[in-house]
Amino acid sequence: MADEQVGNRANAAGLRASRAWLLGRGLAAEVEQVRFTGGDEPVPAPGLPQLLDRLEQDLRDVLALSDRVDALLGGPERAVDLPAIVAVELGAAEEGADEIERVTRQLAQLALGVSTGLPPSKRAERLDSAAVAVLHPPVGTGRTVHLIDDGLELFGHDRHELEVELRGLCCRMLLDGDVSARIGEVVLRVGADQTLHLNTPGGASSWPAPVEVTLPAMAAGTALKDLGMSPKKIRRSAAVG
């Protein structure tokens, strides 16, 4: 692979990472402010500090790797194993950029969970729109990566936090379509007709489009509580497929 092509890919990884970092930071900042606009108690934002920490660390790593590739290509010495070293560094930079984009999508999913727990307002609508644009970018502005490819990670430590995450999950499932998520014996599924189905040991429920995600999120949370699942077990058993 030509040095110029390798350098361009390393620079592109750095630019992708920086762009995703900026989108993620912007979403997080808006979430942190808007969640206090719903009344006496703020809407929880489970996982927000952890996701922001990942953004910062991953960006530093990707930019360092991108710079290292440039330095290796521009160095005066050409070691015999230089192509192999560069390939490893370049691969790590591109994987790191992919990870930052994934974290930004997690923040967008969280933003939807927060906004749907607020009273209707222009600001909540703007946050919704921004989150949707990250998850399903307009044509020519990015690629759509679905929940099935990102996987499901939960952070909540109590029922209120879990319901925020379940609202965000339902929103993303409805955006993607034809996807299911399982937490223990509780299964959420969205089919081609945009109906959201909930299956639990206690029975089945469904909500036709347009879905008010608060309802299935509360029902799923209640089912998990009835099953006696601890927050830790809920977090460990969450999966999509």
Image (cartoon, rainbow, N blue to C red):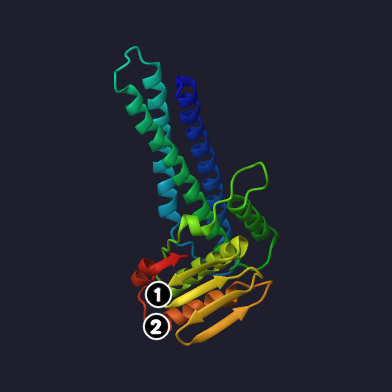
Marks 1 and 2: which is nearer the front?
A: 1
Q: Report the residue marked by disc 2.
A: 227
Do the residues bearing badges 1 and 2 touch, measured as CB atoms within 8 Å?
yes
Residue type, label 1: Gly
Mark earlier in primary sequence (1, 2):
1
- Regarding mark 2 in the picture, which secondary structure is present there? loop
**Left or right position of 129 against 27:** right
* Residue found 38% across the figure and 67% down from its top: 235
Compared with 189, 47 (above or below) is above
> How many residues crowd mark 1 within 10 Å: few (<14), some (14–19), many (20+)?
some
Q: Residue furthest left?
A: 80
Compared with 190, 129 (above or below) is above
**Left or right position of 130 against 95:** right
Q: Quadrant of the N terminus?
A: top left
* Residue found 68% across the figure and 72% down from its top: 209
Q: Report the residue marked by disc 1.
A: 184
